Amino acid sequence: MSALLEVRNLRTTFPGALRPLPVVDDISFSLARGEVLALVGESGSGKSMTALSILRLVPKPGQVVAGEVMLAGEDLLQLPVTQMRRVRGARIAMIFQEPMTCLNPVVTVGAQVMEAIQLHDSMSKVDARARTRELFAEVGIPDPDARLDAYPHHLSGGLKQRVMIAMALSTRPEILIADEPTTALDVTIQAQILALLRNLQRDRGTAILLITHDLGIVNELADRVAVMYAGRLVEVAERKALLSDPLHPYTQGLLRSIPALSRAGERLPEIPGVVPSPDQWPAGCRFSTRCPLRFEPCAELFPEEIRPAAGRRVWCHEVERSMGGKGAS
Amino acid sequence: MSVSAETPTLLRVSGLQTWYPIRKGLMRRLVGWVQAVSDVSFEIGPGQTFALVGESGCGKTTVGRSLLRLESPQKGEVHFEGRDLLKLDSDSMRAARQHIQIIFQDPMASLDPRMRIGDQIAEGMKSFGIGADERERVDRVRALLERVQLDPDTMDRYPHEFSGGQRQRICIARALAVEPRLIVCDESVSALDVSIQAQILNLLRELQDELGLSYLFITHDLSVVRHLAHEVAVMYLGKIVEQGPTERIFDAPAHPYTKGLLASIPSIDPERRGGAPPVLGDVPSPSDPPAGCHFHTRCGVVMDRCRRQAPRLFEIEGGRSRCFLAEHSDPT
């Protein structure tokens, strides 16, 4: 698979009291055509900021200070603003956790999707409406004709998210960035939306960058997984390898602390402590303040990337040591 | 582990109904009811955790708030330590609240941003007369902070100086300060990251073992329930649809909704993924619930009578189920 999107050494900073704080720090990954890559992490890991950096939508005073975002050979970070605006929506679309904040409450949902279509394609109102109806049917909105004229508050959370997905797909983007797309939804509705995203990805071949904190959702949707902690990547692997044989101590801790795996009465394996705030990140491995396997170099020296197997990257001194040096790269 | 007939009961809720009137027009004419909670009954024994689970709009939060009379139920009884809380006058109810505390999902919203956390923890002690003087209360605040694994020297800080997980620990310390018997945990760990969630769940468990606390654990997250609860009730559109010991609910769910709910949880088993969504459609409005069984519009095994007739809670092996499929197993 050739890379459709290639993010190289991306760094995004926010001003700090003493020095700029790199909330996205030297992140590199690629997304192939039709692939689902999950960017996983807890709050403050920088996963959402990575997505916003790709789209050049980092809120001020934050800014992308280094790196490349290559979309089919073109660096998005170098594009003029007008061209970048055309990339957003047309080639890379995004859906968010809370659809209500993205929909205009006083305009019908049909009109909002039609507006998005007409913004990118010159199309008559009648055609745009017909196309919106098709999209509503495709994303599983029941009775799409009636729903075209509904206002957002008439729709349930699940239906609103379907409208957002319809809007995102309306321009046939190559990449869909889905930022916690089901976090605000009930579990039965979440299962429906995950099935919808899976079908759309299969039928349309849209690549998805899925941002989530939930490893269950990763398992449901992703082909590959990149785990982030405190602004850095700690592990990148194919889905099955990551879930069945996590290498980084943080990934291991994350998987173990999921309550679904424990039986009643057992003590949950926890990761001690809290994620340090960006101004307290250690010089070495960011996870070293909480890591059960920490040893001498961890706090001081940032671990280098090692490649224990094809398609697998991990940043950990302990993994490096257990592999007896550099690892097969 | 389950509440057996011999276990003394701390809380007994029976026939609880909380409906909200829908009024319209200039005359505020009554045009209908939001049937938030109907005919809810359960018991919690000392040292037990009872979980109330369901999706948004099922009424689980209204149940918790009705017990504390933060809502006004129309019907039912809430017996706590032998008294019906719904019949108490406001002074007695205030006194009773000492023994039932509540912890919400968002600690930032339930802590006062302009008040030192130590003072917030001590506030309840003062109003319920715990601790002889300031000195004693400060000692107790320090001990409580230590117990929830926070540095006692942070008692002079403000809520914004803590992380989300630490703030939830502060809320737990504040609840414990007045020596409660029952704590209502309303989505108390739902907003936390999974690694922090595990810490708080472990803490709640330890406190239960040490202090013999009972919990009413209200949540949408079934995986959390499995870990903590002795008994579970699943709610749908205002009614309990299934109830029983936790292990039985998870290992052998009886009601089609419980089955669907469990099957909807994304698995982290890499060999298992990609099934069809187990429950179709949306939850109907509680102001206009479907006739017959409330779940019939989304049920995969719906029968003709389900559309006309509302099932009662049938007794089943290890609990109760509000489904006609359980009718044959009910001896009564």
Image (tube, grey):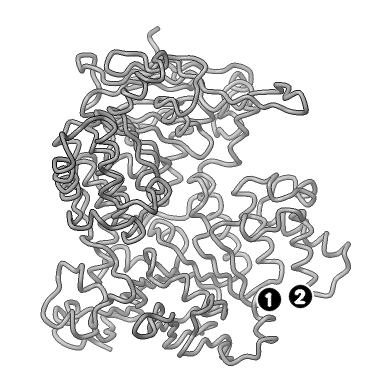
Total of numbered circles in the picture?
Answer: 2
Q: If the image is split into quadrants, where does the C terminus of chain B sit?
A: top left
Above or below A259: residue B49:
above
Provide the residue designation for mark 1: A90
* Residue B88 in the image, given as x and y percentages of width and height: 39, 15
Q: Earlier in the sequence, mark 1 or mark 2?
A: 1
Q: Secondary structure at mark 1?
A: helix
- Residue A158 is at least partly visible in this image: yes
Q: For residue A314, what is the image quadrant? A: bottom left
Q: Residue at x 63, y 26 (%)?
A: B290
Three-letter amino acid code at the position of disc 2: His
- Is B225 in front, or is A171? B225
- Is A281 in front, or is B313? A281
**Residues under numbered marks 1 and 2 in contact, where contact means CB atoms less than 8 Å apart:** yes
Judging from the image, mark 1 belongs to the subunit labelled: A
Image check: A80 left or right of A262? right
- Is B48 in front, or is B119? B119
| Mark 2 burial class by Cα count in 10 Å: few <14, some 14-19, many 20+ | few
Residue B163, numbered circle: none
Provide the residue designation for mark 2: A120
* Residue A147 in the image, given as x and y percentages of width and height: 75, 48
Q: Secondary structure at mark 2?
A: helix
Three-letter amino acid code at the position of disc 1: Ala
Above or below A315: residue A165:
above
Q: Residue at x 46, y 71 (%)?
A: A37
C-alpha gap between disc 1 and disc 2: 7 Å
Above or below A132: residue B186:
above
| Mark 1 burial class by Cα count in 10 Å: few <14, some 14-19, many 20+ | many
Judging from the image, mark 2 belongs to the subunit labelled: A
Above or below A16: residue A198:
above
Image check: B195 left or right of B221? left
